[in-house]
Amino acid sequence: MPEGIAGSELPRKTMGFITEDFLLQNKCAKRLYENFAAKQPVLDYHCHIPVQEIAQDRQFGDLYEIWLEGDHYKWRAMRANGIPERYCTGDAEPFEKFVAWAKTVPHTLRNPLYHWNHLELLRYFEIEETLNEQTAPKIWQQTKERLKSNELSARGILKKFHVRAICTTDDPADPLDHHKALRDSNFQTHVFPTFRPDGAYLISNPEIFNAWVEKLAVTAETQILKFEDFLQALGKRHQDFHDLGCRLSDHGLDQCYAERCSEAEAEVLFNKVRVGKTPNPSECAQFASYMMIFFGKMDAEKGWVKQLHLGALRNVNDRMLLELGRDTGFDSIGDLPQASSIGSYLDSLNRLNALPKMILYNVNPADNYAFATMIGNFQDGSVAGRMQFGAGWWFLDQKEAIENQLNALSNCGLLSHFIGMLTDSRSFMSFPRHEYFRRVLCNLIGSEMETGLLPNDEALVGDMVRRICYENAERYLGLPMEVKHSAGHTNVRDNKSSNGVEPGADTALPARPVRGT
């Protein structure tokens, strides 16, 4: 099979609706997908997959371990279907939890879970039957046997789906031992850390913050006695991440922090929290604002890309938060104002000549046009697509919302420089999300070719599709993609794309013959 998303060349046989033409509703869409999208490799530049599972090449025992464990999307659907918590996060046996999910699947019609689940069963296990309570025992046993193969170990999956590089999400207070092991291995997929320092500016709970600072001190191999020590420790970890190929940072925020705060004021607040005193909300926002400028300056100095995930309303259900903890399916879309604070934060960095390349992710569809127009305020002509309106995430990584994000970006910016999809997932079963996105993209663009809104020029339009699916991201992110040899030694490709152009330089790549890459 030519290199590209696994299963992209499956014949039209099927389970009813997952055919080779899935989501492709016209001839132009089918040609775009087949000739320009399907064969592109994957660069998954933002995910939450545990890096230790890649380093240890985890072998999954059953569908619970690889598919249900930790999946709050499924838990939300199960709860809505009247499934008791025991079968979601509780002490039920793995097979019982799988059957409970199988009972729920027929009720997910029109929810993206129905598409995703059957696409995943087909691409990983070649299972064409729909999942329900009756087919569950057979599917459980079939998949259990298939999961014994090396092809479906953690590393095997990355190879199967032609993942060239993956960027995990990592706390600077955590060690990077697994990333070091992968760097020194002969594993061909590049696994890079992403710098996610949220713990560094969340000071509302002194006990939690101080424990994080002590953990940071251990990892940075230093003492943190004063604010200057704290900043130096963070700078050291930033460099440690860089040395392991990190070129992205990430922040999960309700809103951008954009309060005025001098270093002296931040130091006073740091000292206050370090002796156990609780700051008020205004002081918390001040300190976070200072730290976000600090992180922005570091990212700009090293040429990194900063990611901002904005707008989620997290941990809404206090009782379940106390009972189950975070990331268990009790978050939703927030409705806080975003535009003014984003603009203030970006402008603050820009005035310091310290605005890094940046990706803004929006979780509220009402804000799509605010985000799409905001990035235009800070494009400066130095890099094509320097400021990015990121792919729909969380509640917006489904067909309708993907189309809405693409339309807003197209109407207010340049879709041709968009860096495409990511999984944002904790699951090794999520890589078909790239195929799903590519099919939605090709259907949207192909429909406009059919109706005359775009020229019926397959070479012109297909070149844009191809770049969105992979090449724009490779070039924009500037990851140190190296050629690995059998002994784990590497040859650095000097961060240039295949035509020798520096990442992000000039504009579009020239057209080239369609082929597997």
Image (cartoon, grey):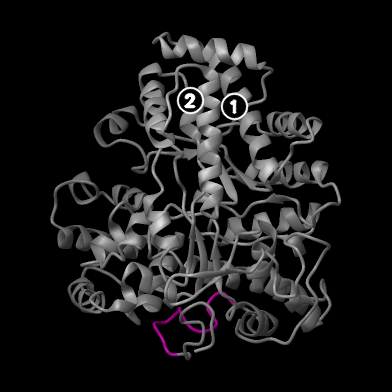
Residue located beneath label 1 in the image: 291
Within the magenta stretch, is there residue 498? no
User: Which mark is on residue 226?
Assistant: none
Classified by dominant secondary structure, the portion drawn in magenta counts as: loop
- Name the image quarter holding residue 121: bottom left
Q: Secondary structure at mark 2?
A: loop
How crowded is the residue under tag 2: few (<14 C-alpha within 10 Å), some, or many (20+)?
some
Q: On the image, numbered disc 2 is attached to which residue?
A: 202
Residue kind at label 1, given as amino acid type? Met
Label 2–label 1 contact, CB within 8 A: no
Q: Give the structural element (helix, strand or loop) at label 1.
A: helix
- Given residues 456 and 503, the one toward you in this image is 503
Residue 486 percent location from the top left of the image: 43, 77
Closer to the camera, 430 or 88? 430
Range drawn in magenta? 13-24
Question: Going by the image, does 148 lie left or right of 478?
Answer: left
| Farthest-out residue, right | 381
Q: Residue 248 at x, y = what percent?
A: 59, 49
Q: Is residue 130 visible?
A: no
The residue at 77%/76% (across/down) is: 461
**Badge 1 density bin: few <14, some 14–19, many ≥20, Cα 10 Å:** many
82 shown above or below 400: above
Q: Please give left or right for residue 434 compared with residue 353 in the image.
A: left
Q: What is the number of callouts on the image? A: 2
Is residue 234 in sight in this rendering? yes
In the rendered structure, the answer to whether residue 120 lies left or right of residue 23 reads left
Going by the numbered disc 2, the residue's amino acid type is Leu
Residue closest to the eye, 18 or 233? 233
- Residue 94 at what x, y percent from top left? 17, 59
Quadrant showing the C terminus: bottom right
